[in-house]
């Protein structure tokens, strides 16, 4: 290595994504024959609908479908996204100007930042919250300001705190996420109205990340349902969780035409569009009957029951009203920290669960269990943990 070459400052400022390092550790343990049960990553393990896969395969066999695509995606895909929003959220989206397909909403976090932030601009991110909100905005040179979520407030923002932060000036963007990851807390119409009012009064863009609204949730909601929301708000959505298409990298961003134009300009300079067969398959997925979501949630409901047993075996407490793809539990009193507790479970029970500290300081003292493992695997995890805790 040439010692005269140094990385950019952002390389030194950013830590490696926590899951990347932990999954290497889990892979080493599996290579040693330890057979770790992974209840960590929120990547659905089930297949997409058969007709979605068949659409992909048929389209991939079509000559001409393997060329570059435009950043705006297929008009038919944008129309399908618009129709999906109308059917499930009762939100009108103009397919020509108010929606943009994304290579997953994680990439969308980057494009939104590129479109709105200059170095030094302030960004509000939830604590606890999705790590990408912090990592991406730091890479962009923004000043990341965490805002508190806690159990006492039902993991809802403290608007007194937000008003104090906003009064200092310089805040350009605020990230919100409901159903919340990692806590599973739900939003209300009142909360969404307050967020839009806060953004409008302080000229702050409210960016809502909404990938979990269909998982174990009978009432999917969109921030864009609120009157006037498009004037100040952006919503990201995804087929990763709702349609078991995580590896397909298919998401969307919806907002007013100006915001979408700015984001599309950034996207067009970064990627070359999505694979046409994937877009055509996504159209099929977005038009699935409601029974698709019902059947999917039956599976997750059964797994959730096992996850609750695991939390109880670990001595953790949890809110039964949680929704989404995870179960969030509070560690027993006297537990030193979430990292050492999770490591003990990994190395003694050979079960990978996620310590809450990785989501921010307010996540310390909690654990997160993913529902993305078969019920049989989760039952095996329960047996191992009960043995570790000397419960059986």
Image (cartoon, rainbow, N blue to C red):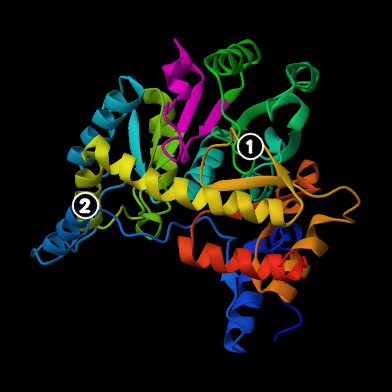
Q: Residues within 10 Å of mark 1 (few under 14, many from 20)?
A: some
Residue reaching furthest left? 63
Q: CA distance from mark 2 to mark 1?
A: 36 Å
* 278 or 154, nearer to the observer: 154
Residue assigned mark 1? 118
- In the image, residue 298 above or below residue 28: above
Mark 2: which secondary structure? helix
Q: Which of the marked residues, 2 or 1, is nearer the chain's N terminus? A: 1
- In the image, residue 119 above or below residue 226: below
Residue assigned mark 2? 281
In the figure, residue 387 lies in which quadrant?
A: bottom right
Look at 41% across and 46% down and name the residue there.
267
In the figure, residue 58 lies in which quadrant?
A: bottom left
* 381 or 232, nearer to the observer: 381
Mark 1: which secondary structure? loop
Quarter occupied by the N terminus: bottom right
Q: Residues within 10 Å of mark 2 (few under 14, many from 20)?
A: many
Look at 67% across and 62% down and name the residue there.
18
Q: Which residues are magenta?
A: 206-235
Answer yes or no: is residue 72 visible. Answer: no
């Amino acid at each position: 290595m040439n010692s005269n070459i140094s990385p950019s400052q952002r390389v030194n400022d950013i830590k490696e994504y926590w899951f990347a390092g932990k999954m290497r550790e889990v892979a080493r343990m599996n290579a040693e024959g330890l057979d770790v049960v992974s209840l960590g990553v929120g990547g659905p393990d089930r297949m997409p609908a058969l007709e979605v896969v068949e659409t992909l395969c048929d389209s991939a066999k079509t000559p001409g479908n393997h060329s570059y695509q435009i950043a705006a995606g297929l008009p038919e895909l944008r129309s399908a996204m618009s129709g999906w929003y109308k059917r499930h959220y009762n939100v009108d989206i103009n397919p020509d100007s108010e929606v943009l397909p994304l290579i997953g909403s994680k990439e969308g976090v980057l494009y939104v930042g590129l479109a709105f932030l200059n170095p030094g601009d302030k960004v509000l991110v939830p604590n606890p919250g999705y790590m990408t909100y912090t990592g991406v905005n730091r890479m962009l040179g923004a000043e990341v300001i965490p805002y508190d979520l806690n159990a006492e407030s039902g993991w809802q923002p403290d608007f007194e705190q937000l008003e104090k932060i906003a009064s200092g000036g310089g805040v350009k963007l605020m990230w919100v996420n409901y159903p919340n990851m990692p806590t599973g807390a739900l939003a209300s119409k009142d909360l969404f109205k307050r967020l839009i009012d806060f953004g409008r009064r302080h000229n702050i863009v409210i960016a809502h990340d909404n990938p979990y609204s269909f998982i174990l949730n009978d009432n999917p909601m969109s921030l864009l349902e609120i009157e006037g929301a498009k004037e100040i708000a952006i919503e990201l959505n995804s087929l990763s969780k709702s349609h078991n298409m995580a590896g397909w990298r298919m998401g969307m961003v919806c907002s007013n035409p100006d915001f979408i134009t700015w984001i599309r300009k950034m996207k067009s300079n970064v990627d070359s569009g999505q694979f046409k067969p994937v877009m055509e398959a996504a159209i099929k997925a977005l038009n699935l009957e409601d029974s698709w979501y019902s059947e999917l949630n039956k599976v997750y409901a059964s797994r959730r029951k096992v996850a609750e047993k695991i939390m109880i075996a670990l001595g953790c407490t949890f809110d039964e009203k949680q929704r989404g793809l995870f179960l969030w539990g509070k560690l027993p009193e006297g537990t030193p920290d979430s990292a050492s507790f999770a490591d003990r479970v990994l190395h003694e029970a050979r079960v990978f669960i996620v310590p809450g500290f990785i989501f921010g300081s307010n996540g310390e003292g909690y654990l997160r269990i993913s529902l993305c493992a078969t019920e049989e695997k989760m039952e095996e995890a329960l047996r191992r943990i009960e043995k570790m805790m000397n419960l059986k």
